[in-house]
Image (cartoon, rainbow, N blue to C red):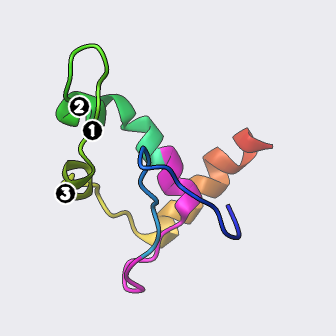
Amino acid sequence: MNGKFIASNLCIILKPKNDKYKVNLKFYKYYLESLQKQIRSDLADGTSKLTINADDLMDYYIEYILIDEQNKFYDENIKNMRS
């Protein structure tokens, strides 16, 4: 997404914070989607309507994958799926 937008309090914006750890946001979108069930299982709270505390999600360990590997995986696997 480019430009200005408003995010509700029901989402967290993923953005690069440290130039030392370069990220391909399209790769991490796919990566986090693949972990969605595990993250929900580990962090969700509630009975009829599950919620995830933003602070808990921010503290959740997400493995850093080297940028070359991110880009290679994206180019070989994800890029063509989106076309």
In this rendering, position of residue 14 left or right of residue 53: right
Q: Amino acid at mark 1?
A: Ile
Q: Residue at x 36, y 38 (%)?
A: 35
- Residue 67: percent from the left, percent from the top? 47, 71
Residue 5 to residue 40: above or below: below
Judged left or right of residue 67, residue 55 is left
- Residue placed under numbered mark 2 in the picture: 44
Q: Position of residue 9 (x, y in %)?
A: 42, 49
Q: Write the residue at 43% across / 37% down.
A: 34
| Residues packed near mark 2 inside 10 Å, few (<14), some (14 to 19) or many (20 plus) | some
Q: What amino acid type should be assigned to the residue bearing mark 3? A: Asp
2 and 1 marks in contact (CB < 8 Å): yes
* Three-letter code for the amino acid on which mark 2 is drawn: Ala
Q: Quadrant of the N terminus?
A: bottom right
- Residue found 49% across the figure and 49% down from its top: 8
Label 2 and label 1: CA atoms lie apart by 5 Å
Packing grade of label 3 (10 A; few <14, some 14-19, many >=20) is: few
Q: How many marks?
A: 3
Label whose residue precedes the other's in the sequence (3 or 1): 1
Q: Nearer the viewer, residue 81 or 68?
A: 81
Q: Is residue 10 magenta?
A: no
Q: Which mark is residue 41?
A: none
Mark 3 sits on what residue? 59
Q: Residue at x 21, y 54 (%)?
A: 55
Quadrant in the picture for residue 24: bottom right
Label 1 Cα crowd, 10 Å radius (few <14 / some 14-19 / many 20+): some
Mark 1, residue position? 52
What segment is highlighted magenta in the picture?
17-30
- Secondary structure under the numbered disc 3 in the rendered image: helix
**Counting residues from the N terminus, which is met first, the one under dot 2 or under dot 3?**
2
Q: Nearer the viewer, residue 49 or 35?
A: 49
Give the spatial CA distance, label 3 vs label 1: 12 Å
